[in-house]
Image (spheres, helix red, strand yellow):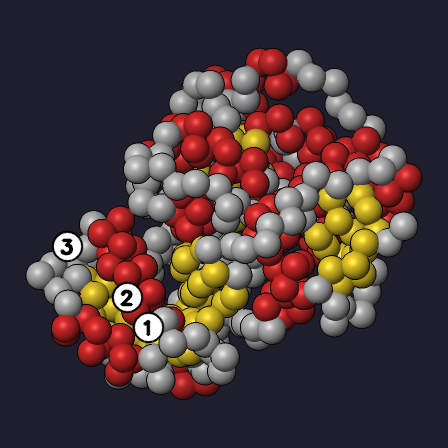
Amino acid sequence: MTEHLSRAQARRVALAAQGFLDPRHTAPTMRTFARTLERTGVLQVDSVNVLQRAHYVPLYSRMGPYDTGLLQRAAERRPRRVVEYWAHVQAFMPVELWPHMQHRMTAYREARGKWWRGVPEELSASLLAEVRARGASTARQLDDGAPRRKDHWGWNWSEARKALDLLYMTGDLAIAGRTPSFEPVYDVPERVLPPEVLALPTPSPEEAARELVRRAARSHGVATAPCLRDYYRMGVEETRRAVGELVEAGELLPARVEGWDRPAYLHRDARRPRRVDARALLSPFDPVVWERERTERLFGFRYRIEIYVPAEKRVHGYYVLPFLLGDRLVARVDLKADRAARRLLVRGAYAEPDAPPQTAPELVVELRRLAGWLGLDADEPVVVEPRGDLAPPLEDLLRSG
């Protein structure tokens, strides 16, 4: 039997799966954090800090203002609840997924010649032994002084840094934390992962694929096979096989969604709310919007990150966050935290063609709340620059108080 969903129903299912039905607590706790992580599954890590680092914002979008130390404690203190790995891309994932990534680690080890060509095996072995002996260390602390290459626009790594990256991808090292300047701190897995996680048996590649697709389906609520594959960046064939097995087991229900040209799958436990009353700014790296084709199918919202686009060619701005109101994406704002002046700068603000009349007032409330969470406490904490059709009404509302 095939389930049939309207586009609006699919939106609400997706938002419920991502935690936008969960009640917000006055002071979010570690229990709130754990519930939210269960919804998102992973938190993509990104170094861009023009507003706030990407892994913190999805938690804020769902929990409201929270102490960012919650994530730091979950990642760096015992009992560790999350660990970084290449799960979606670089991301925090629940520690219990470590055994399910073993097949991925093996594949990176076998692909060494393709991705880490030129890194001597002796160097990797030497660095691993040194970390094991001296404890958690950054690449800078372990650097052997080898000259740093500058022949690639995005990288400036020493040979030691490349070798550490290889050891991390193959699971021989894990990330124990990050420095204030965002440098990864490496250590051996037995000093990072809880012993009960390391003692778990390694699942077969087929078992691991089923678990990853199962988790992707829970986090999506309803999704096509490519969306399920993208969540944990899996292969086409392993995803196809896992989807088939989960359909046969009754965990995934075949579905058709209005306007979608591909078969979809509904998780059997997905909530189907009649209404979603969300109000949130979403990071460019939020799971709701990171798969752009899915975002367009669900919300009719075409979204592209313009960080790497030359300034004169950008359409909406450098760091643009979609604004979720109810169950729709109704606007987008280009934001920057001016930490020196303690102000939140709205560099541009744009309403979607069908944005409701309450978009500007609701967005003002959200911008003020975001400024407060970021500690931007100037007398006028939100400053709107005259760019975009939403800028004038936002400015008027802020002036009127």
The residue singled out by tag 1 in the image is 360
Tell me how far mark 3 sits from mark 1, CA to CA: 21 Å
The residue singled out by tag 3 in the image is 377
Q: Which of 299 and 373 is in front in this view?
A: 299
Q: Can residue 280 be seen in this view?
A: yes
Circles 3 and 1, Cβ within 8 Å, touching? The answer is no
Amino acid found under the numbered disc labelled 1: Ala
Q: Which of 20 and 232 is in front in this view?
A: 20
Height in image: 23 above or below 155? above
Residue sitting at 41 percent across and 58 percent down?
Answer: 279
The nearer-to-camera label among 3 and 1 is: 1
The mark that comes first in sequence, 3 or 1, is 1
Q: Residue 335 carries which label?
A: none
The nearer-to-camera label among 3 and 2 is: 2
157 on left or right of 16: left
65 on left or right of 126: left
Query: Residue 137 falls in which quadrant of the image?
Result: top left
Q: In the structure shown, which secondary structural element does the residue marked by tag 3 occupy?
A: loop
Residue sitting at 20 percent across and 78 percent down?
Answer: 396
Circles 2 and 1, Cβ within 8 Å, touching? The answer is yes
The mark that comes first in sequence, 3 or 2, is 2
The residue singled out by tag 2 in the image is 364
Q: In the structure shown, which secondary structural element does the residue marked by tag 2 occupy?
A: helix
Q: In the structure shown, which secondary structural element does the residue marked by tag 1 occupy?
A: helix
Tell me how far mark 2 sits from mark 1, CA to CA: 6 Å
Residue sitting at 30 percent across and 74 percent down?
Answer: 347
Height in image: 378 above or below 75? below
- How would you rate the neighbour count of disc 2 (Cα within 10 Å): few for under 14, some for 14-19, many for 20 or more? some
